[in-house]
Amino acid sequence: MVDTLPPAERLLNLVIALVNTPGRMTKEQIRGSVAGYDREGSTDAFERMFERDKDALRELGVPVVTVHGPAHADDVGYRVDLDAYALPTMELSAAQLAVLGLAAELWQDQTLRADAARALTKLRVVGTTPSATDALVGLAPRLHAAGPALGPLLDAAHARQLVEFTYRTASTGEVLRRQVEPWRIIASRGGWYLVGLDRGRGAPRVFRLSRIVGDVVATGAPEAFRVPAAADPMAMLVDAQHGADRVAWLAVAPDRAGALRSRAVEAPDGERAPAAAPAGRDLVVVPYDRDLADEIAGYTDAVLVLGPDDLRDAVIRRLTAAAAMGDRIGEPTGAGHG
């Protein structure tokens, strides 16, 4: 029977076996007990695969050591040196643990959420003051879920591999297929963004991950492009968010929409609000970027748009669509019979 596990899973199985062996494991024992190796194929094929796996683990920092049998030098086995592999004693201050906690919070609802939570739990155990990790309480970052697009885009950006995906534009709602060189993934203002070269348009573009429809597919070979030395992805994102320095005039309910309030700016010289804020609401002026309508719609009735008109219309469209979807979900699936 041939095992067809992914290489990463086979490597993990090998590490678990070599860590838990009481003495050592011979190649025959590894081939017969570790899932992922072909127990019925040729010995040469197994030898080549095992040597590659052993080298890969050592490159990853896993100390796989060779152990010779006491009677014969050619009786060779393998194990992981637990003294070299164990995490050394760590002394983390409350502030350091709190910062790590903030970093882990960035992965809420992401593909690495479980891994981040487990890692943080282990670090809290070895910290000197695990009960004092509230040094930065109240500073938890506000980041919306990136969804399933994040993992494939990170992999493709690292491998310099082209990606294809379907994207819904913010201004028109048009859904088009895009082929992009992924230069960088950036978390900003509560959202995740891809900055890269849109090959179909022949120009750099910024894409919000929440507007990607369906799967992200890596295409072609790795190392298919280079990020231009003069490219500044962060500056591109800032330019896309700020547009032409427009501002939005908002009427915000008390103690609501803290993320919007944190970005408030002074009203531009000579400009006034297009309408007065209703009684009991605060007038908040924020930079107007093309993603603002999505954010405001998420606050429902806590935020009213006083201007500009195109922003108010965009928010109304989103809320109307959400209400219509709610009505459809609440409809009965079939007619009853009396």
Image: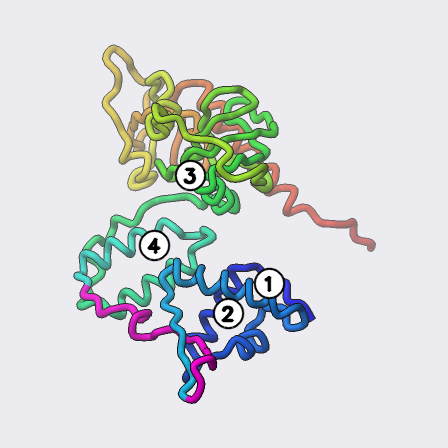
Q: Which of pointers 4 and 1 lies earlier in the amino acid sequence? A: 1
Reply above or below: 230 against 259: above
At mark 2, the secondary structure is helix
Task: Kindly report the distance in space between the C-alpha atoms of the residues bearing marks 4 and 3.
Answer: 16 Å
Residue wearing tag 2: 13
Task: Give the quadrant of the C terminus.
Answer: bottom right
Q: Which residues are magenta?
A: 71-91
Q: Nearer the viewer, residue 16 or 216?
A: 16
Residue wearing tag 3: 192
Marks 1 and 3 close (CB-CB < 8 Å): no
At mark 1, the secondary structure is loop
Marks 4 and 2 close (CB-CB < 8 Å): no
Amino acid on which the number 4 mark rests in the picture: Ala
Amino acid on which the number 1 mark rests in the picture: Leu
Marks 1 and 2 close (CB-CB < 8 Å): yes
Q: Position of residue 85 (x, y in %)?
A: 33, 69
Q: From this viewpoint, is residue 248 visible?
A: no
Residue wearing tag 4: 104
Farthest-out residue, right: 337
Q: Position of residue 43 (x, y in %)?
A: 62, 70
Reply above or below: 57 against 317: below
Task: Kindly report the distance in space between the C-alpha atoms of the residues bearing marks 4 and 1.
Answer: 29 Å
Q: From this viewpoint, is residue 234 visible?
A: yes
Residue at point 30%, 70% (across, down): 84
